[in-house]
Image (cartoon, rainbow, N blue to C red):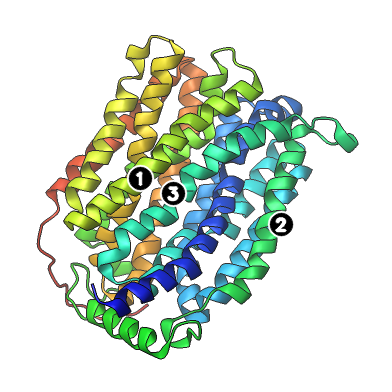
Amino acid sequence: MSDIEKSSIRRITLRLMPFLMVCYFFALLDRVNVGFASLQMNKDIGLSPAVFGFGASLFFVSYFLVEVPSNLALEKFGARRWISRIMITWGLISAGMVFVVGPKSFYVMRFVLGAAEAGFFPGAILFLTYWLPSIYRARFIAVFAVSIPVASFLGSPLSAMLLGLDGMLGLKGWQWLFICEGLPATLLGVTCLFVLTDRPVKAKWLTNEQRSWLIERIEKDSSQKAAIGHLSIWQLLLDKQFLMLTIVYSGASVTGSVLAIWQPQILKSYGLTIMQTGLLNSVPYGIASILMILWGRHSDRTNERRWHTALTLLLISAGLGSMALASGILTPTVMLLSFALIGAYSLKGPFWALASGRMSPKTAAAGLAGVNAISNLLGGVGISLVGMIKQYSGSFVIALLPVVLLTAIGGISVLLMTHEKKHVSATITT
């Protein structure tokens, strides 16, 4: 590695990664804190498991509808302004959950929140492809995505503490939770305008030599043939490679979404207090935070993506599929949930490196957003499905079986993907 390469990557890392990670931390916190709020809120406003599951899942419906248009808007208007817009709106709406008074208002606010946040994650991934050569992407995407488990690792005890403010100034604990965890996102959205830079060519914080090296290297990566060539949005939906990538990512997305919403209730069912639930809920996420970075680095070091992706899905399937063996005992249950979350988050680095490498630059904006949007929609379906199955079966073990099946299919699917990238000749119309 040359000195100019080392200095360029180091400066990009220090400039962009910490800030993006903090932003994504609050995005995830505002998305999943409803799981902890439910420990008080459901009783206060009269939400059954099925009603709560359906309402929580509406986030992903609007997220799905707005995701691709949002990513295309980011490409058109620039990451700096568009990510700022996303964060300001979702922060205000998340804090606005304080006004929820029943099922209907809960449905509306979850739907609007999904539309506001749509586009942040795939937009950030697309943004990083402007700044990182392909050889660095798995490790840096893993570092960026570590905000997901960290949000639950730190957010679980934090949310439990905020629930303890119940009654202060006449507000419920769950209302304090939404206010204190929502407004920081809005402040970060304003900060985006001063920290982010749309493209390397505009980066005054790089030296001329660093800027030239980076632009040349990114252009070289972009010139390589991709498995998914220049396709329109509608052509993408019929492309075999795109559909396979979507199936693969859906397994991890559904797992993360389902456990973020339902895991606090799974643990609370063992007779724990709210604070005990918060502390114990953070354990699997803490373990996953460390291992997903190591897994992403190993994927980059070996330049291998397929097995690094497949094994994580099979770990999820094995972990959740073995829940019945825990026989209602807390320790093995936490261990198996840890396996599932390790798999769900360790997948992200190698998968997004695999996905971005299989799409042409002009298809990446719609393609990455499309994979993420469909996967998150299925995540919402999973949340609602688990709620319905739990209500009628009385068992979380049975309710999680669809997730076991989906992750097993995803693990097999990624192994069926061809080693060689095939160029698809089509005309981009997006």
Q: Secondary structure at mark 1?
A: helix
The residue nearer to you, when weighing 225 against 236, is: 225
Image point 63% across, 25% down: which residue? 48
Q: Say if mark 2 contacts mark 1, CB within 8 Å.
A: no
Q: Does residue 318 appear left or right of residue 206 in this picture?
A: left
Residue occupied by mark 3 = 146
Spot occupied by residue 254 in the image (x, y as percentages of width and height): 40, 40
Residue located at (31% from left, 30% from top): 404
Alpha-carbon span between mark 3 and mark 2 = 24 Å
Look at the numbered discs 3 and 1 and tell me whether their residues touch, using CB distance below 8 Å: yes
What is the secondary structure assignment of the residue under circle 3?
Answer: loop
The answer to whether 135 appears left or right of 175 in the picture is: left
Furthest toward the right, the residue is 169
Q: Tell me where residue 317 appears, x and y as whole percent.
A: 28, 31
Q: Residues within 10 Å of mark 3 (few under 14, many from 20)?
A: many
Up-down relation of residue 270 to residue 266 (above or below): above
Q: Disc 2 designates what residue?
A: 92
- Spot occupied by residue 312 in the image (x, y as percentages of width and height): 27, 40
Query: Is 287 located above or below residue 9 in the figure?
Result: above
Q: Nearer the viewer, residue 181 or 19?
A: 19
Residue type pointed to by label 3:
Val
Q: Residues within 10 Å of mark 2 (few under 14, many from 20)?
A: many
Q: Amino acid at mark 2?
A: Leu
